[in-house]
Image (spheres, helix red, strand yellow):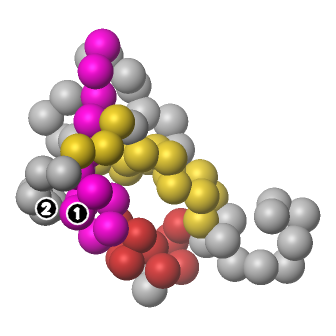
Amino acid sequence: LRASDLDYTIVYPTALTNGPATDTYRVGENISMNSAVLKVSRADVGHFMYRAARDAEWIGRDAVITSGDS
């Protein structure tokens, strides 16, 4: 994937939950993992993936996503 000419974003969510969208998640290429159990809702991951697909900011990058309250 990285060697291709494709526009891509690789998304690495922490533990997934079935909770509602909160729009308070954190995304970064290098997030500090201070909590023993980091989690994020599938709805928030979907929200981020939708945004990333429509914006060039995350093209060619890896995105770690977790809840905003961890």
Q: Quadrant of the N terminus?
A: bottom right
User: Which numbered dot is residue 52?
Assistant: none
Q: Which contiguous range is marked in magenta?
A: 36-47
Neighbor class of circle 1 (other Cα within 10 Å; few <14, some 14-19, many 20+) is some
- The answer to which of 59 and 40 lies nearer the viewer is 40
Residue 62 in percent (x, y) is at 59, 52
Q: Position of residue 14 (x, y in %)?
A: 38, 37
Residue at the (27%, 36%) spot, across then down: 39
Q: Residue furthest front?
A: 18
Q: Residue shown at 69%/78% (left/top)?
A: 7
Q: CA distance from mark 1 to mark 2?
A: 5 Å
Amino acid type assigned to the residue bearing label 2 in the image: Ala
Residue 65 position within the rendered picture, expressed as x and y whole percent measured from the top left:
38, 47
Q: Is residue 42 left or right of residue 4?
A: left
Could you tell me if the residues under marks 1 and 2 are in contact, i.e. CB atoms within 8 Å? Answer: yes
Query: Image quadrant of residue 5?
Result: bottom right
Outermost residue toward the bottom? 54
Quick one: quadrant of the C terminus? top left
